[in-house]
Amino acid sequence: MATITVLPHEELCPEGATFEAPAGISLCQALLDQHIEIEHACAMSCACTTCHVVVREGYDDVNEASDVEEDLLDMAWGLEPESRLSCQVKLEDDTKLVIEIPKYTINHAKEDH
């Protein structure tokens, strides 16, 4: 099981959270499974930046970003060197991450998922 710590986010996770998630799923799916309603306007197909997260700890322990993901990240609000699209981070059994969900996305209106 992977261990995920989410730093407090005013709207999505005000208290922050720590939870375990099964290997083989994306970080985005793990967040959604915990009722942390991160945006994912492209249905997790690596076609937007709404599921952008910053990996504060564990960045070097996850799969590398593809060229497509890197190109999309250039459009993300609040881009940092440790930014990833959560739909593209695949969890492994020994994954331990601390993530921050940025305050904003590039969406003008939130999707109702």
Image (tube, helix red, strand yellow):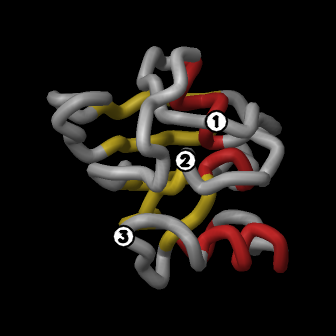
Residue designated by label 1: 41
* Real-space Cα separation, disc 2 to disc 3, in angstroms: 12 Å
* Among the two numbered marks 2 and 3 on one chain, the one whose residue lies closer to the N terminus: 2
Amino acid under label 3? Gly
* Among the two numbered marks 1 and 2 on one chain, the one whose residue lies closer to the N terminus: 1
Q: Residue at x 40, y 54 (%)?
A: 99
Q: Residue at x 27, y 50 (%)?
A: 103
Q: Residues at badges 1 and 2 in contact (C-beta under 8 Å)?
A: yes
Mark 2: give few (<14), some (14-19) or many (20+) Cα within 10 Å: many
Amino acid under label 1? Ala
* Residue 78: assigned label: 3
* Real-space Cα separation, disc 1 to disc 3, in angstroms: 18 Å
On screen, residue 98 above or below 44: below
On screen, residue 66 above or below 88: below
Q: Residue at x 56, y 71 (%)?
A: 75
Amino acid under label 2? Thr
* Real-space Cα separation, disc 1 to disc 2, in angstroms: 6 Å
Q: Secondary structure at mark 1?
A: loop
Q: Measured from the top left, where is residue 20 in percent x and y?
A: 52, 29
Front-most of 100 and 97?
100
Whether residue 58 sits left or right of residue 30 in the image: it is left
Q: Measured from the top left, where is residue 13 in percent x and y?
A: 27, 29
Q: Measured from the top left, where is residue 63 in percent x and y?
A: 76, 66
* Among the two numbered marks 1 and 3 on one chain, the one whose residue lies closer to the N terminus: 1
Residue designated by label 2: 50
Q: Residue at x 75, y 32 (%)?
A: 43
Mark 1: give few (<14), some (14-19) or many (20+) Cα within 10 Å: some
